[in-house]
Amino acid sequence: MKYLSLLILLISFNSFALVIKGEVNRKYDNTSYRAVEPWTIEESKHFHSLISPENDLKMYFLILPALGKPNDIFLKAWRKIDPTFKLKIDQLVSPPATKGWEAIHKISYEVPIKESRLIAADYGLYKGKAYVTLIDGKYSTLQKRGAQLQLMAQSWKPDDLKEEILSDKEAKLITDKEIRILDQFLQSSMRDLKIPGLQIAMVQNGKMVWEKSFGVVKLGSKEKISSNTLFMIGSTTKPLTTLLEARLVDKKILSWDEPLYKILPSFTLKDKDVSQKLQLKHTACACTGMPRRDLDFIFEYSGISAEERLAQLKSMSPTTDFGETFQYSNLLVAAGGYAAAHALFPSLTLDAAYDKAMNQEVFIPLSMKNTRIHPLKDDSTASPHALNINNRIDPIPQEMDDMVYAVAPAGAIWSTATDLIQYILFELNNGKINEERILTVENLEKRRTPGVKVDEKAHYGLGLFIDDFKGIKTIGHGGNTLGFTSEMIFLPNQNIGWALLSNAGSSPLRSLFKQKVFEVLFEAKRESHKNLQFRLNLIQQSFSKMRAEISDSTSKTKWLEPLIGDWKSNELGIMKIEKNNKDYVADFGEWKSGLASMTKQENTFVLISAPWSGSFHFQLQKDGTLLLDAGQTKYEFKRIK
């Protein structure tokens, strides 16, 4: 790829360059796509290039005859850009075709970890042609401009490509027949995806039509999940937090346009000018340009208060302009929720104020009797689980998921599927519960108003995703912690909604179940079983590949011996590298993980215990520091002498 920049420069002299302002529609041969500000388009005879303002993320659209195997087509496409291209394949997959395509193929390439870079491609097959998208970019820019890239890539398609549209269909009434099909799908998917426990609840036309619990609270336990078993719901907390904020706006205690520092005087970002203009509504819009800094609270959280966690924002700044692109910040959502609670109970700590405010303004008015921030002594709670390096499910300590408590408004709530149905009923009844108005229509709609774009069809509101799924409007929010996965979704125009909770982290079941619901209720194309099989194969492939690329054998990890000792990151705290018999372990205080060496990446080790399972690459630098590259943020661990 060393000639890539030169080729782009040469091509630009024979091409049409356009700096995008706003959002524009572009034509390329028999296709159309949308480009967004502040990217640049370069149009040549053989392809179109879309270049990020940082100039280190580039996407290319090409149309080629669909002749040969997928890898042959990808290679021909890359060599249109760079005749010397010869990177090794990292992974080549063919997911089930959707959205009118006859086939879809995706590929990624091996790139040294130290380059912090993605080189990948995909193409859709249609009428004998391959519509190829090539991507070459730095992870840091991918993180902040990924939504823009998604929007542009998804919008590029042949003008006559026809997607499945369900908007002209009425939803079936959910009867025993529909429930039986959905029940069977959940049970078989649970077995295949190794999910220990699950709750489902569905509502249609204002009535609960299905509620059921499956499995056990903990792998190896005989205790069954019941309708009263509490699950952590992760980011599904966010709509409940913005409901608290909306209630206080209704009561004239707050205003959406009120600067946050006036509500919470201790709040400030690194850039004081940005701090001054950041309003309450901005904390939940994912539109401020604040980067995701989850590692800051995943690695070090024991004994850290909400006040101390928010103080970390003083060292952080947005990386894109307000309203420019979707960037998801749990810390900023937490700041907004805590500010609202502080406005209501200024004499309490932020944690206590948020707990009391949510009970008073959300849980009690919505009759969510089994929903709380901290479980009570007599509560039945599910235990978290995650996949280990061998692709088997393991229980993980609940203490690992306790990392969310210092950012509670972004993801710490415990609830049940039936309690979340109470929230869905409130949304479907336009702000009322049992004819009692909980929220004005004005502020209900404020939270649902489409804001920054997430991709071609989805927007983010205020703590809510607003999507167009095959022509049908869906609103909701999913959630993940390390050991739980949740989904809360409703269809406002069809008066249908459901909540799905499981005690397995990062499970794909929520998107698979959504597709199955649309198949059953709207007779959508039957894709859920194919998608499930593809996800199972992909998970197995990915874990097999990971195991082949790491080793904890003595011969491969002996280079870790000199690293034994204490290391410190200013942001992530202390890491103790220890040796336990022949195995190396990293102890971060709150949790520990076994270590393995990357066999293809020099001087790099990874964490292998669940839930990390090959995540987090620590690179030994020439200056003796250990680098954890998280894209937009680079964390350095220095040895403590």
Image (cartoon, rainbow, N blue to C red):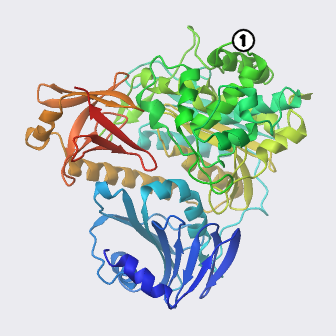
- Whether residue 422 is visible, yes or no, is no
Please, is residue 248 above or below residue 448 in the view?
A: above
- Indicate the position of residue 515 as horizontal and vertical percent values: 60, 53
Q: Residue furthest front?
A: 272
Quadrant of image for the N terminus: bottom left
Quadrant of image for the C terminus: top left
Callout 1: 10 Å neighbours few (<14), some, many (20+)? few
Task: Return the residue nearer the eye: 50 or 527.
Answer: 50
Task: Return the residue nearer the eye: 424 or 612.
Answer: 612
Task: Return the residue nearer the eye: 390 or 401.
Answer: 401
- Indicate the position of residue 37 as horizontal and vertical percent values: 64, 67
Q: Residue furthest top?
A: 377
The type of residue carrying mark 1 is Ser
**Does 169 sit left or right of 30 as displayed?**
right
**Does 518 sit left or right of 637 as displayed?**
right
Q: Residue furthest left?
A: 555
Write down the residue under mark 1.
347
User: Which quadrant holds residue 418?
Assistant: top right
User: Which quadrant holds residue 180?
Assistant: top right
Please, is residue 157 above or below residue 465 in the view?
A: below
- Whether residue 138 is visible, yes or no, is yes
- Indicate the position of residue 486 as horizontal and vertical percent values: 57, 36
User: Which quadrant holds residue 7?
Assistant: bottom left
- Indicate the position of residue 124 as horizontal and vertical percent values: 50, 74
**Does 555 sit left or right of 155 as displayed?**
left
Task: Return the residue nearer the eye: 210 or 60.
Answer: 60
Please, is residue 76 above or below residue 331 in the view?
A: below
